Image (cartoon, rainbow, N blue to C red):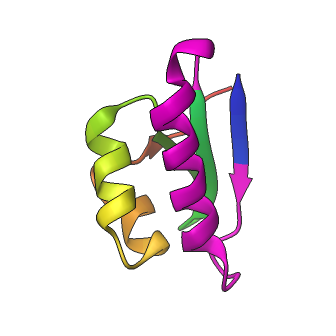
Amino acid sequence: DIVDPHSLHLSDALPKLKGLAEYAEKHAGKYRRIESVAAFNGKLKVLDLMEPTVRKQVLDSDNAKSLFESELAFDYMN
């Protein structure tokens, strides 16, 4: 499993998220889950990078924060 804690306030947030999406594209078959987790509006939100639609949106995005506030992100539960 890969659960990546993500900090949206850092300038490299989007490049790191895109890198994880690219990694997931190539290696998803080796993992049960590949997720990016970020604090947003007082909650932990998750992007499931095992999902092809999520990876595509990440790779096409120009703003990491908008991804975590979109319908692609869900509330994190341990």
Residue 54 inside the magenta-drawn segment: no
Residue 77 drawn at (x, y percent): 60, 29
Pick the front one: 53 or 42: 53
Count of numbered badges drawn on the protein: 0
Q: Is residue 43 visible?
A: no
Residue at 59% of width from left, 49% of height from top? 20
Q: Is residue 72 above or below residue 27?
A: below
Residue 69 drawn at (x, y percent): 38, 64
Q: Is residue 34 above or below residue 60?
A: above
Q: Residue furthest toward the bottom?
A: 11
Q: Is residue 56 visible?
A: yes
In the figure, is residue 15 to the left or right of 4? Answer: left
Q: Is residue 17 above or below residue 8?
A: above
In the figure, is residue 14 to the left or right of 48? Answer: right
Q: Residue furthest toward the front?
A: 26
Q: Which quadrant: the N terminus?
A: top right
Magenta segment main secondary structure? helix
Pick the front one: 29 or 3: 29
In the figure, residue 63 lies in which quadrant? bottom left
Pick the front one: 64 or 21: 21
Residue 60 drawn at (x, y percent): 30, 65
Residue at 61% of width from left, 14% of height from top? 30
Q: Which residues are magenta?
A: 5-33
Pick the front one: 52 or 8: 52
Q: Which quadrant: the C terminus?
A: top right
